[in-house]
Amino acid sequence: MTEESMKTRTSGKMVYRLAEGGAGMVRLFGSKGAHASEMAGMGLPVPPGFVITTDAALEYYRQGRRFPDGLWDAVVENVHVLEKETGRRFGGKKHPLIVSVRSGAAVSMPGMMDTILNMGVTDETVGGLAQMMGDERPALDAHRRLVQGFGGVVLGIPKDRFETVLADAKRERGLAFDHELEPDALRTIIERFKALIAEASGEPLPTDPWELLRRAIQAVFDSWNNPRAITYREHEGISHDLGTGCVIMSMVFGNLGPDSGTGVLFTRSPATGEKTLYGEFLVNAQGEDVVAGVRTPEPIAALKDEMPRVYKELEEIARQLEAHYRDVQDIEFTVERGKLFILQTRTAKRTAPAAVRIAVDLVHEGVLSESDALGRIAPEDVTQVLLPRFVPEAKQQAVDDGRLLAQGLGASPGAASGIVVMDPDRAVERAAAGERVVLVRHETSPDDVHGIIKAEAVLTSRGGMTSHAAVVTRGMGKPCVVGCEELLFDAASGTATARGKTITEGDIISVDGATGEVFVGEVATKAPDAGEMAELNVLLGWADNFRRLGVWANADNPEDAALARKNGAEGIGLVRTEHMFFAEERLPHIRRLLEVGPYASRLIREAGEAEAALDAAPASQRENLRQRLDDARSAVETSSSVPEFRAELARLEQYQTEDFYGIMKAMEGLPVVIRLLDAPLHEFLPHWEELLVEELTLSIAAEAAEHGVDAADWLAESIRKGIGGLDEPKRVLAVVDSLASRDWASIERLHEDAVRTRELVGLLREANPMMGNRGCRVGLTMPEIYEMQVRAIVTAACRLTEEGSTIFPEIMIPIVSHVNELKWLRPRLRAVASATREALGAHMTYKFGTMIEVPRAALTAGEIAENTEFFSFGSNDLTQMTFAFSRDDAEAKFIGHYVDLGVLSGNPFSSLDPQGVGRLMRMAVEEGRAANPGIPIGICGEHGGDPASIALCHELGLDYVSASPYRVPVARLAAAQSALGVLTPGE
Amino acid sequence: MTEESMKTRTSGKMVYRLAEGGAGMVRLFGSKGAHASEMAGMGLPVPPGFVITTDAALEYYRQGRRFPDGLWDAVVENVHVLEKETGRRFGGKKHPLIVSVRSGAAVSMPGMMDTILNMGVTDETVGGLAQMMGDERPALDAHRRLVQGFGGVVLGIPKDRFETVLADAKRERGLAFDHELEPDALRTIIERFKALIAEASGEPLPTDPWELLRRAIQAVFDSWNNPRAITYREHEGISHDLGTGCVIMSMVFGNLGPDSGTGVLFTRSPATGEKTLYGEFLVNAQGEDVVAGVRTPEPIAALKDEMPRVYKELEEIARQLEAHYRDVQDIEFTVERGKLFILQTRTAKRTAPAAVRIAVDLVHEGVLSESDALGRIAPEDVTQVLLPRFVPEAKQQAVDDGRLLAQGLGASPGAASGIVVMDPDRAVERAAAGERVVLVRHETSPDDVHGIIKAEAVLTSRGGMTSHAAVVTRGMGKPCVVGCEELLFDAASGTATARGKTITEGDIISVDGATGEVFVGEVATKAPDAGEMAELNVLLGWADNFRRLGVWANADNPEDAALARKNGAEGIGLVRTEHMFFAEERLPHIRRLLEVGPYASRLIREAGEAEAALDAAPASQRENLRQRLDDARSAVETSSSVPEFRAELARLEQYQTEDFYGIMKAMEGLPVVIRLLDAPLHEFLPHWEELLVEELTLSIAAEAAEHGVDAADWLAESIRKGIGGLDEPKRVLAVVDSLASRDWASIERLHEDAVRTRELVGLLREANPMMGNRGCRVGLTMPEIYEMQVRAIVTAACRLTEEGSTIFPEIMIPIVSHVNELKWLRPRLRAVASATREALGAHMTYKFGTMIEVPRAALTAGEIAENTEFFSFGSNDLTQMTFAFSRDDAEAKFIGHYVDLGVLSGNPFSSLDPQGVGRLMRMAVEEGRAANPGIPIGICGEHGGDPASIALCHELGLDYVSASPYRVPVARLAAAQSALGVLTPGE
């Protein structure tokens, strides 16, 4: 920065009186200062004061922690103004002016920065203060607090050293509480504090109140850069360049007798949103005493009787502030000898259900427009309204009983109880046995998903909001707490411990995925009540009026489809057909299909080619070609593979027809997008490494049968010991069992089967399956599978049509990278569809569309659009390929580290990357629409349920997003906010 | 097509007399017709004739194999013109007109379509023909040939049935050769042929010569669509919409006595390019007799003595045609009773060395400009000049000895001999033992590369020009024959058989990668001679003047760098540092590095962060932060991982410094781009599945030691049987050996090691390593490795600078997907580089650049360009991610099928895909240059040596391509052709 620009920067006014500013000056004043200023402007009883700007603080940092020229003079001048306003004097022996020095940034950073109170109380002034207060004790206590605060905050002396002095003094006198200390005791403590300061900092406590003030301001500035504040800003994504403001205000005292007091007030209930004053009040106390929690405050209603005039004034001010700010306020106030002072107001934090109720009520009260109300709710909060949560009383009871086990990050909202299980396989087992299970792990990986599916909730000790557990459970609408680092695992004993409590498999715990709290034992949960749901539905109804994006859902079965529909989905944007292949009774058929399929498919293709060649040939060639066709046909007819292949296809077709029938029936009248098989084929078969181990084990076991049956036991044992590296050695363990029980017959049978399976998997396995033979590539190399799926879809749709339903199947071809794949596949599949429909004689229509999930498809979207009837972005794969991030590997190995370093602002699998992936999407939308005007375009990746991604989809002009059924309400709100410009894409 | 446009189409002239056309009418006349026409126009002695246009043929196909209106009338009319010109009559009993009916497309399709000769010879006319010829035998023989040709070609009767009749007739008479057949025998044969035709086709041979002519023309048209021709066009990428022309020419006869004959003439030697008439001549024969190979033709020079006048005329015509066409001609001629006729001329095919010599000579002769000459050489052919090839005489001898084993596709030029080895591991072993090895496989995969590296040549029975073997060997400049399907393997005996010869491991074979020929036994090879090299260098020198693209090379060691430099490389565009890690003596150090690295790196990072926090903190925080730093430092100091990590890094740094020293020294004065570690880390460790099996095996073996030593033998045996699924079970086999020899001590030692290694690999292995933790991601998660490499590069460069060399190292960061990766890494690495340079006190400069190989990097090239000093396209990875094709998987599983189906026009890993990958590259070039004008941009993927890809790089405005050292000359020529517009990007 040049000297000139530095001058420009500091030439502005650095200190403002409260009355000079207003709520619009948040950046310059900080939030606290701006709102105090606003209230002063409204004529509310705010204690007089002034604000040092954030710019002054920034300049202070820039000059290496030196006050900019003129700052101190301006502070002194404003203190003198304060003196005039209050008729008191700073450092005066009589009527001394006492001020607070508070930090306050433009963005709320609760408790992260420092504040020093009672500034101006010194040995010189304490007498005058006592006189003014009419009591020596509160004056001396104010002095004690000043010395303690200065020593700890400004001089950085460990705070426990002051606490020790205080505790000693109370012990010496047999006292329990600070407020029981008499003047003498306080004087002793103050002297001991001074001695401590002199010893620890090497200098005595300054006696000049101006010097103290100056250093207090400096400490407030410095606290912007304490590690805690830096960490907090990094975590919350707050800029380090904002700086803090500093608010200096004349102190008022709530501890001057029964006509004094202090309290906190919410203009509506932050728990339920009910329109009633809500808060607490403590007579004859300062704010710190409320926080200390020694005396129990009274509910605010009590004030009505005790100080009716104050209550009435407070009530009026509350309504005035709520109307002024058009939102619920959280107000701090103090009553000094019957006079009410408002110290602070801010928008009240509230629970998600309260937020919804308040927003809806404010619209009904005419305070807010519908669009304003929509902007008030964070889309993520919507799920909290929909999901079960703890009964507040039950939770309070659990806290009171000391059953809080640990506190982590609330990663996926909802609350649940269940038995602790620390292994995904055990989770499956115990869930199968009818138990409610909470999966407790260090962290989760894709290998744990089967356990997560069966669990009521998930708790991990590691990972953040974008960790695997967090992302997966959010997609499933299942409570999850992550990053619960205080939970320490002991692998040997299979236990985990936190706060002195130990849990092990079978113990009941309760998890709140919204707050991150974990309790030992059961905590009662409640579903959202009818009133809450009704209010949410009002809000979402407004959202539907404002949004331009359609909201569809991803569902693989009729139950999910029904839930999606109930949550407002306007269609199914993705049915993943491969999920239907994984069912246990289907796997043997898939396996046989894959064994005979490649050869059978080749024979069928060759016969087809021979027939086409004969048809096209001139007479002179016909004889040769007739021979070729005869040979090819005879190969088809005599092969045993072909009939088996066809039989397995027929069997799968039956299964799939039922699958599609159910989903389409649930979505009657709405479109259902069904994606043809996408997964790499070897996913349907056992893992390669286990097969190798199994084969070896069987080879040894088979030999053992001949050479000494006595070896079977130690062999079984040594095999058990030697398979620690296998993730799920179920097949191998079956062999071991057979060996241990000398079941030679089954070993022989298994052996042959193992070699065959291993050979099959050996043919199918790939170095990078994500980029291998999957999706439409299989559709081209073994077309019969796609043809079978298309027949199943059209058959199910025809059957439903016959039954009187209106059905809109949309058939989607995945992993397209080149338009020629579509040019080859689409006419063939269309012919199959049309032949099937004709054979069944039903009147229904279908579309054939394309996933855009490979970068090349986006880059050539124009020519692809000419050959397809809709686009759907597979943003998960598109993100993988665009970043060259394999999701499984990247999330496990480096994305977290990248986010920590700030290399990535977030996990691109959670929120769409606008620069890279978003750019490809924009190209695809623009060029696809140019080539095929009006082509419908949606997104069906997990991003479809993420608010920032939805904002990007809105901006790109997509027609719809498709989200998990649980996230459909979130998406509806986010889509409305996008249309209203409230929500914008990230970065 | 509408009726109107059909009329327009046929309204044109469908038949032209030769004199009406010229060489410019290739599309309409076909090549043969156009050049006959051109010669007629030049006044050369071409037999009179006419051409039916390709448009007429296309119309014939369009109308369902029906002559378009007016075509036959035009043919009849032109036959009458011919009658006038020759004074003969078609179907006349006296002086009959005899014509040939030849096919001929615009593009040469040698031997793929049909031709019928002797049209007009019938029972009626044969007597008149005999009279005209002065001999009955040639006339009857012409009749025999007509009947046989018509039956086989027009009527589609299997040709061997005619051959059988002919053979029977000769056997009956005890004759060996056709030309020994006397008139009576010929008459008998003609009658038998007629009977065969009547029997096989159900109709007698037509007797009307016009009917015969009409059907011959039809057969010529139809032959465009015979399967052979269709396949050929698909293979060669020739459009199916060209159609064939049909040339009808008055026949001349070279078999009318000693003053007649026929021959073929090249205007220069097609083998060497020498400027001398080259060709063969057969007295008293027709063209077919030359082809039949019964009589040995004389060299053309003999004609000088035998027919001096004809020779002189021929010589003149040859020079005239060469000058006219400005290229070497391949001329067919016939002498009929002393009169010379030129039947055909075409540009001569030639060997690559001949092509170079001819092009250079034609420039020196003033016929061609330098740029014309550059356009004459296919870039691929350049490698053939550079590489060893068979000594022609030795090869001829091998053919004569019947040693030709098989014929495949010449996939990578060059010739070599060596012993047959059918397993890549064996290839490594026998090569290590000093033997020259030819690797013979069904096909190769990435798992075979270690064997390919050690082999002199590769031979596969499957795969095409884009198969794995083809691509890899071309990159290595190593001869390769693929798709040699006649070679049948017998796995049981370990042999392969073709043409009745069987080869097995240890047998010597010789492979010509240019022609695809494979011989049994040794065939002598020769390196290019000095003259050839000199001519090539002249040509490449011209290329260097015309090209705009720089040509650099990829090299991983000093030998390759030296070769690249010798071949004209102007820099090294890619040094792959991971290849240097694979050396056997380095692997233990890598492994230890990876074991201790992640933890040690974290401790070091934490200490660094603590130090930075302390430096930045205000006084009030210093005490706490000092404590944190002390803790972090003490963790570093007391850990055993950190010193080990540093020791291993130091050791690797030494190795790498030597590596870089050698390469940079070889490239003194030229830039050397060194890529920092790119490979996924687990590539440096044993395979996961083998480790699992090894661990199990060891567990059992360890147990066996305690329970009955007698079990060791059968256990070892059963393990051997059970590991069939492992690719390279070396580690497991070592265990088996220890078990068999009861070496319990080594089993125990191996066991512990195996578990540790398995655990390490378990941490590092990935689902999709291509998209996992590699490249700069490792650079961010474990920065010490990149820092070590940068130190090694700068140290080597400083050392060379000290020694007086001028060194330009360019350090390249791979797998960048986000600009923030560079923002994080580059300043750190630059600091390391600058500290290293300062410590060594040398004056040298270096650059830091970025690979563009992830789509997101291309999509955000603007911001990346601002943070880097050069770009280099990693087009291999970019192609993988853009298509979502894992190269290993896609080439093995579906790319071949895609090319067969026409879904892809070629393998995108061989030639850059202009639409998808090319578009990303274009964006990166344009936006990179806009943000950082003049930023140097190159390409270092395998595409850098592919001519079509080079043309695309030229079009995109890249600064240089970097190719394999063997392909540098190819790239120089391709770059020049791109600049000249001769070579254009594919599709």
Image (cartoon, coloured by chain):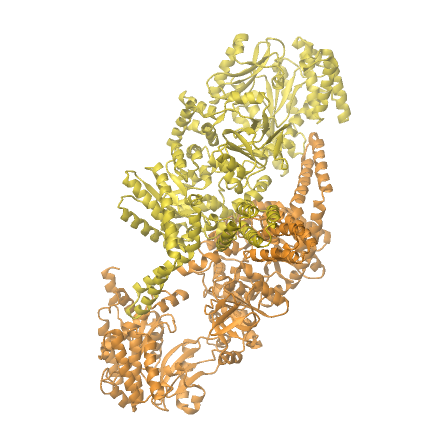
Chain colours: A yellow, B orange
Q: Quadrant of residue B67?
A: bottom left
Q: Please determine whether, in this image, residue B348 is positioned above or below residue A841.
A: below
Q: Is residue B953 left or right of residue A831?
A: right
Q: Position of residue A291 (x, y in %)?
A: 61, 19
Q: On screen, A303 above or below A508?
A: above
Depth check: B580 or A781 in front?
A781
Percent from the top left, x then y, of residue A691?
Answer: 53, 51
**Would residue B196 be seen by someone viewing this image from the given angle?**
yes
The residue lying toward the viewer, choosing from A630 and A38, is A630
Where residue B275 sits: x, y (%)?
A: 48, 81
Exactly how many numbered labels are in the figure?
0
Residue at figure coordinates x 71%, y 39% from the top left? B635
Q: Point out residue B961 in the picture as x, y percentages from the top left corner.
A: 54, 60
Q: Is residue B249 in sight in this rendering?
A: no
- Give the position of the N terminus of chain A as an image quadrant: top right
* Of residues A850 and B662, the one drawn nearer to the viewer in this rendering: A850
Front-lying residue, A759 or A525: A759
